[in-house]
């Protein structure tokens, strides 16, 4: 796209990301001097694997006003619906890209390409895309019955991006009523693999207490823990996690 | 005769609560009889025990508080005791990071006790009935708001969504260990309260007459407050605050005991147990995607009873 | 022979300075005095309420050392308040005055205090005067050795004022006990054996009615004196 190409040639390209999920793309693909601002969440160890790197940058709380003074020439958002972020950024003579929520892994890949292009070089996305292709090719044909759970038994819908990532690790997310794994279900029809998100594991909530119930603990032999932070966005950081799961699962 | 009938009824309600839904039990038995046992023991039993025990505690504590304050509308929720317990438990677990259920029960008891003390400091025991209730409602609302605030500011973002469970109650997915942490102190508190039932009856004659008969009204007052705080506090720390049962059960019980406030303690306990079990049963039976919290049902039933009681009180207070 | 009741240093901090007195069997004692002077405090102190000082013995037994069962036989207290919080039936309320069931005694009281029409009604729905009778019934039900009654005659019609004094006299005579009754109506004093004048937080006069009425302390305390048409303001 001509507009972005001209931006990237000017060494003054700086990008501000206003959403945790767009932070992921930015932190993966951009050089530090190209990053103007990331969200506060990206700097929180409980929310992001990249929190250390993220701390080098100014933090924003997802509002366009907070990046006015940041020299950002491009603003990344996701799901900007309702907010006139795009309109305001153009008024402030900043370019704006609104990435769509990924409904599939293919969407994640397409977002990667788009951000790499906005940074001036589509080839920056290639390493990641190559790894994804390798994962997809070497897909283990056998899919085991699995349930992903977070606190309180909250699970994923089989069509969701998270479930599609699980399939790449050989796990088939079961369809559950209400999107929740009830204790009765876990007792009477336990999955082959219980994929447990450790998101905010040490912090108290009723959902965290759910994991202490004997019926959940009984499934310890078939429970595999996964870093819950990547699952929040289901974005590019999932690649590392799925590669790890592939290796970890027998 | 009446007691026997009540106990039979209670057992029937408990059996209904324990075994429903019957479908999954028979499915479990089909797979493996041991599985059905596990289902009953690990999942259903804590649920039924908690509903029964919590309801009984609310009934007995409510009746005791009503006798103590000589006020037919005093109760753990209206005096702020339940909300205070929730505040204590939330502070201890979300902010101090305590996980031991016994410590949490203690925190709940402390919260409940402090709320009652605050009420006494603000209103005093000898205040006009309605003034005491207003003070109690104020304490209750303040504690409820503080609980929501603590949850909103807690480290985990899930905490805020927990406020519904804390303020409206829940028996879902509790373990036997949690049931024990709540019900052992609650049972002890109830037993000690029941031993004071006769003295509470005599309290109807006034503190001075009670003293002239050889009792110590002030000490009795402190005991009642501490015991009901411990009982209610322990239950709230596991199941959240459930309202109105502590109000309705004693009101109904006093109909059966011809107005005697102390004699009503045990019947109130039995009625409270049945009320909570039935409300929980109803909340799970309504086929919706989201379960209705128990506290919502007890409030829906309780509010008209509360208003009716208030209206009849008003008639009596007229000169 | 020792007195039925011996009170040593009884009082209530700030309300009644420690006082001692003895009461004999068969005595009907009236307690009079200006409002706020300590009348109620004397009765409460003798009844051993929580803030009471000193010691009281009845029939030689120290009250503070006895439990409920024995206390009921030794003393009974009727406070001045006519408040009833709970809808307890009148007969059940009377039963509060007994340690063990005694249906005959309850029937006797219902007759004595003409409570037959009110027997099944909840006490909190009665008029003040009716409640007063029921509460008096509770106090005398146990036939205690010492009756302590705080203003039992207020809120009563003239018939019941006189009738109550008669009932008390009959009870005291029948049980060889004693009664301490605080009264406002000075014209009733002739029906009592002894009068205690309590004023300024102390017992200032103690003796037969005529003596106390004529005493200087009486005038100081009440600031009224006998005149042509009953009582008149002193010095007017």
Image: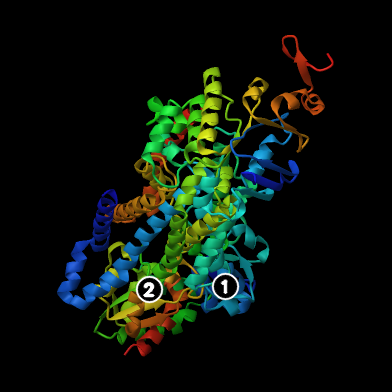
Rendered location of residue A56, percent (x, y): 64, 76
| Farthest residue, direction right | C235
Quadrant in which the C terminus of chain C is drawn: top right
Q: In this view, does B201 lie to the left or right of A30?
A: left
Quadrant in which the N terminus of chain C is drawn: top right
In this picture the colour scheme is rainbow
Rendered location of residue C153, percent (x, y): 58, 26
Rendered location of residue A71, percent (x, y): 66, 66
| Farthest residue, direction front | C1
Camera-side residue of C189 and A157: C189
Q: Name the residue under label 1.
A: A44
Camera-side residue of B254 and C196: C196
Q: Is residue C146 left or right of residue A212?
A: right
Chain under numbered label 2: A
* Contact, mark 1 vs mark 2 (Cβ under 8 Å): no
Q: Which residue occupies 62% across, 75% down?
A: A55
Camera-side residue of C227 and B36: C227
Q: In this view, does C16 lie to the left or right of B66?
A: right
Chain under numbered label 1: A
Q: Which numbered circle lies on residue A213?
A: 2
Disc nearer the start of the sequence (1/2)? 1
In this picture, is C146 found above or below C218? below
Q: Which residue occupies 44% across, 75% down?
A: A228
| Mark 2 neighbour density, 10 Å: few (under 14) some (14–19) many (20 or more) | some
Camera-side residue of B172 and A41: B172
| Mark 1 neighbour density, 10 Å: few (under 14) some (14–19) many (20 or more) | some
Rendered location of residue B311, percent (x, y): 45, 32
């Amino acid at each position: 796209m001509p507009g972005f190409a001209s931006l990237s040639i000017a060494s003054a390209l700086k990008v501000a990301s206003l959403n945790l999920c767009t932070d992921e793309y930015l932190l993966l693909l951009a050089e530090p001097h190209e990053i103007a601002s990331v969200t506060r969440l990206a700097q929180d160890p409980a929310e992001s694997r990249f929190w250390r790197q993220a701390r080098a940058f100014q933090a924003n709380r997802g509002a366009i006003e907070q990046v006015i003074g940041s020299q950002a020439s491009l603003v990344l958002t996701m799901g900007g619906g309702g907010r006139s972020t795009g309109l305001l950024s153009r008024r402030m003579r900043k370019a704006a890209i609104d990435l769509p929520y990924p409904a599939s892994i293919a969407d994640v890949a397409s977002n990667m390409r788009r951000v790499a292009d906005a940074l001036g070089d589509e080839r920056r996305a290639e390493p990641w895309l190559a790894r994804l292709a390798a994962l997809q090719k070497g897909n283990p044909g056998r899919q085991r019955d699995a349930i992903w759970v977070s606190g309180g038994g909250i699970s994923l819908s089989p069509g969701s991006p998270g479930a599609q990532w699980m399939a790449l690790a050989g796990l088939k997310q079961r369809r559950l009523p209400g999107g929740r794994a009830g204790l009765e279900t876990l007792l009477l029809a336990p999955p082959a693999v219980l994929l447990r998100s450790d998101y905010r594991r040490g912090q108290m909530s009723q959902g965290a207490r759910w994991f202490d119930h004997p019926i959940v603990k009984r499934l310890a032999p078939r429970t595999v823990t996964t870093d819950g932070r990547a699952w929040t966005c289901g974005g590019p950081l999932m690649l590392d996690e799925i590669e790890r799961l592939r290796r970890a699962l027998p | 005769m009446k007691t026997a009938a009540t106990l039979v009824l209670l057992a029937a309600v408990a059996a209904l609560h324990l075994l429903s839904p019957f479908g999954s039990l028979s499915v479990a038995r089909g797979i493996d009889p041991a599985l059905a046992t596990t289902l009953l023991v690990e999942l259903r039993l804590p649920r039924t025990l908690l509903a029964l025990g919590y309801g009984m505690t609310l009934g007995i504590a409510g009746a005791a508080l009503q006798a103590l304050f000589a006020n037919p509308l005093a109760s753990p929720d209206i005096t702020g005791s339940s909300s205070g317990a929730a505040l204590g438990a939330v502070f201890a677990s979300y902010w101090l990071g305590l996980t031991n259920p016994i410590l949490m029960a203690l925190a709940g008891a402390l919260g409940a006790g402090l709320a009652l003390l605050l009420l006494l400091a603000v209103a005093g025991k000898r205040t006009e009935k309605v003034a005491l209730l207003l003070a109690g409602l104020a304490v209750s609302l303040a504690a409820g708001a503080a609980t929501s605030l603590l949850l909103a500011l807690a480290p985990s973002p899930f905490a805020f969504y927990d406020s519904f469970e804390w303020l409206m109650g829940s028996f879902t997915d509790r373990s036997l260990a949690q049931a024990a942490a709540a019900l052992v102190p609650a049972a002890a508190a109830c037993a000690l309260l029941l031993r004071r039932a006769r003295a509470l009856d005599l309290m109807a004659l006034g503190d001075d007459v009670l003293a002239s008969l050889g009792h110590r009204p002030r000490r009795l007052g402190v005991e009642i407050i501490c015991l009901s705080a411990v009982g209610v506090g322990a239950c709230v720390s596991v199941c959240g605050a459930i309202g109105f049962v502590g109000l309705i059960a004693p009101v109904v019980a006093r109909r059966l005991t011809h107005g005697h406030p102390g004699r009503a303690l045990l019947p109130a306990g039995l009625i409270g147990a049945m009320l909570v079990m039935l409300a929980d049963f109803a909340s799970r039976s309504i086929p919706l995607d989201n379960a209705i919290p128990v506290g919502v049902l007890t409030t829906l039933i309780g509010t008209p009873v509360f208003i009716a009681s208030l209206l009849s009180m008003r008639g009596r207070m007229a000169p | 022979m020792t007195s039925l009741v011996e009170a040593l240093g009884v009082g209530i901090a700030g309300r009644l300075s420690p006082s001692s007195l003895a009461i004999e069997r068969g005595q009907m004692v009236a307690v009079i005095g200006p409002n706020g002077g300590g009348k109620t405090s004397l009765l409460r102190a003798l009844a051993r309420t929580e803030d009471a000082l000193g010691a009281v013995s009845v029939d030689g037994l120290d009250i503070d050392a006895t439990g409920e069962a024995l206390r009921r036989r030794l003393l009974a207290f009727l406070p001045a308040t006519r408040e009833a919080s709970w809808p307890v039936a009148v007969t059940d309320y009377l039963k509060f005055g007994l340690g063990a069931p005694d249906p005959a005694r309850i029937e006797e009281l219902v007759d004595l205090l003409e409570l037959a029409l009110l027997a099944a009604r909840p006490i909190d729905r009665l008029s003040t005067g009716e409640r007063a009778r029921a509460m008096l019934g509770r106090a005398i039900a146990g036939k205690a050795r010492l009756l302590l009654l705080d203003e039992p005659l207020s809120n009563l019609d003239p018939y019941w004022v006189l009738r109550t004094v008669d009932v008390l006299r009959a009870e005291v005579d029948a049980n060889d006990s004693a009664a301490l009754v605080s009264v406002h109506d000075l014209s009733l004093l002739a029906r009592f054996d002894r009068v205690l004048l309590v004023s300024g937080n102390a017992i200032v006069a103690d003796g037969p009615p005529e003596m106390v009425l004529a005493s200087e302390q009486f005038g100081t305390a009440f600031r009224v004196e006998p005149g042509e048409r009953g009582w008149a303001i002193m010095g007017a």
